[in-house]
Image: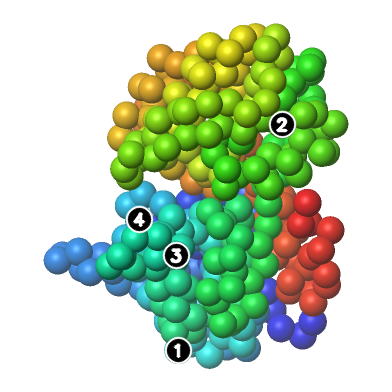
């Protein structure tokens, strides 16, 4: 490739961006991302990007709206600086939970996000473990959708859990649980639950056998941890010897940390798609794995116009 690879980062997950830059063996390019006194975001690209192949890393995590605006404004700045191609690298894609009209008079915010990113000037997107796979179709630009499965699988395989069952916290996660269990030669169980409102869920029944087994709860994200904690207790009540949890995106908002600490969960395995701040670091049950090499390899292959199929495990 004649185009120079340039790696930029917003402020949402600088630690992950630095790990990716180390994997690729290039430094992060310079950009000033600050605010005016009234809170408006100010961006200035501090080096020449004309004709460059630019990858902009930004997770849509807390503070969510600020992170998204940083992403959009940086894309616009790069476009107006004549970058040849701009790839939005979004480890955690925000506003993905409203991906369809399941009630009257509600938005499809996941589609709106895709439109904003495209309109800002991104030529393609690279993301990980979308809340729903069909969100890829909301974009009118190419999307590479990675999974954190290889990273989580390596850790679980090395943990020597013995006989265990992969548990999907809801019907929507069955495909994810089945694929994970297939790689490990394990059985699956499904939680039949009824959602009473946003961030509220009531466990109804467990479809499958967890008696005397290690239960591994698998989900794409943990937000307030209400669902995962209630599910863990239901598995314990059904005779599971120990209950573990694994997810890609540790949103961990509101009372999540307190709930996890007081729960029957043995360990909660997450990735660094979202950075853990403050008290999150001090929860002994949380184990963080890095997805920097996975994202770094995808960036390298996209830049070199090589296939990324082998990364879609």
Classed neighbour count for the residue bearing mark 2: other residues with Cα under 10 Å, few (<14), some (14–19), many (≥20): many
Mark pair 4, 3: CA separation: 20 Å
Q: In the rendered structure, which disc, 4 or 3, sits on the residue that comes first in sequence? A: 4
Q: Position of residue 33 (x, y in %)?
A: 37, 66
Q: Residue at label 4? A: 64
Q: Residue at label 1? A: 80
Q: Residue at label 2? A: 188
Which residue does the image show at 77% across and 29% down from the upper left? Answer: 187
The mark closer to the camera, 4 or 3, is: 3
Mark pair 3, 1: CA separation: 33 Å
Classed neighbour count for the residue bearing mark 1: other residues with Cα under 10 Å, few (<14), some (14–19), many (≥20): few
Task: Classify mark 3: helix, strand or loop.
Answer: loop
Compared to residue 28, the image places residue 235 above or below, namely above
In which quadrant of the rendered image does the N terminus lie? bottom right
Q: In the rendered structure, which disc, 2 or 1, sits on the residue that comes first in sequence? A: 1
Classed neighbour count for the residue bearing mark 4: other residues with Cα under 10 Å, few (<14), some (14–19), many (≥20): some
Q: Which mark is residue 94?
A: none
Which residue does the image show at 56% across and 57% down from the upper left? Answer: 132
Which residue does the image show at 31% across and 43% down from the upper left? Answer: 197
Task: Classify mark 1: helix, strand or loop.
Answer: helix
Display coloring? rainbow
Q: In the rendered structure, which disc, 1 or 4, sits on the residue that comes first in sequence? A: 4
Mark pair 2, 1: CA separation: 50 Å
Q: In the rendered structure, which disc, 2 or 4, sits on the residue that comes first in sequence? A: 4
Residue 305 visible, this angle: yes
Q: Residue at label 3? A: 100
Apparent side of residue 230 relative to residue 267 in the rendered image (left or right): left
């Amino acid at each position: 490739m004649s185009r120079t690879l340039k790696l930029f980062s917003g402020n949402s997950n600088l630690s992950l961006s630095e790990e990716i830059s180390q994997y690729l063996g290039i430094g992060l390019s310079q950009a000033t991302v600050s605010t005016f006194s009234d809170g408006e975001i100010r961006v200035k690209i501090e080096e020449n990007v004309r004709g460059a192949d630019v990858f902009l890393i930004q997770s849509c995590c807390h503070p969510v709206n600020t992170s998204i605006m940083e992403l959009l404004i940086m894309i616009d700045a790069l476009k107006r600086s004549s970058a040849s191609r701009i790839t939005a690298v979004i480890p955690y894609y925000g506003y993905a939970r409203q991906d369809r009209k399941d009630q009257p008079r509600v938005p499809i915010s996941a589609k709106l996000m895709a439109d904003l990113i495209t309109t800002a000037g991104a030529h393609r997107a690279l993301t990980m473990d979308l809340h729903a796979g069909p969100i890829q179709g909301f974009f009118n630009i190419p999307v590479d959708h990675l999974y954190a499965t290889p990273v989580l699988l390596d850790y679980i395989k090395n943990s020597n859990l013995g006989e265990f069952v992969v548990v999907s916290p809801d019907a929507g996660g069955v495909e994810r649980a089945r694929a994970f269990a297939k790689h490990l030669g394990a059985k699956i169980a499904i939680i039949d639950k009824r959602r009473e409102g946003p961030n509220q869920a009531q466990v109804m029944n467990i479809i499958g056998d967890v008696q005397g087994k290690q239960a591994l709860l698998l989900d794409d994200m943990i937000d307030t941890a209400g669902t995962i904690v209630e599910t863990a207790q239901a598995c314990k009540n059904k005779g599971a010897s120990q209950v573990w949890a694994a997810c890609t995106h540790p949103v961990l908002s509101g009372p999540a940390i307190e709930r996890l600490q007081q729960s029957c969960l043995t360990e909660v395995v997450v990735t660094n798609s979202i950075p853990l701040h403050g008290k999150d670091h001090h929860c002994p049950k949380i184990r963080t794995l890095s997805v920097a090499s996975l994202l770094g390899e995808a960036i390298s292959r996209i830049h070199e116009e090589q296939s990324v199929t082998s990364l879609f495990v």
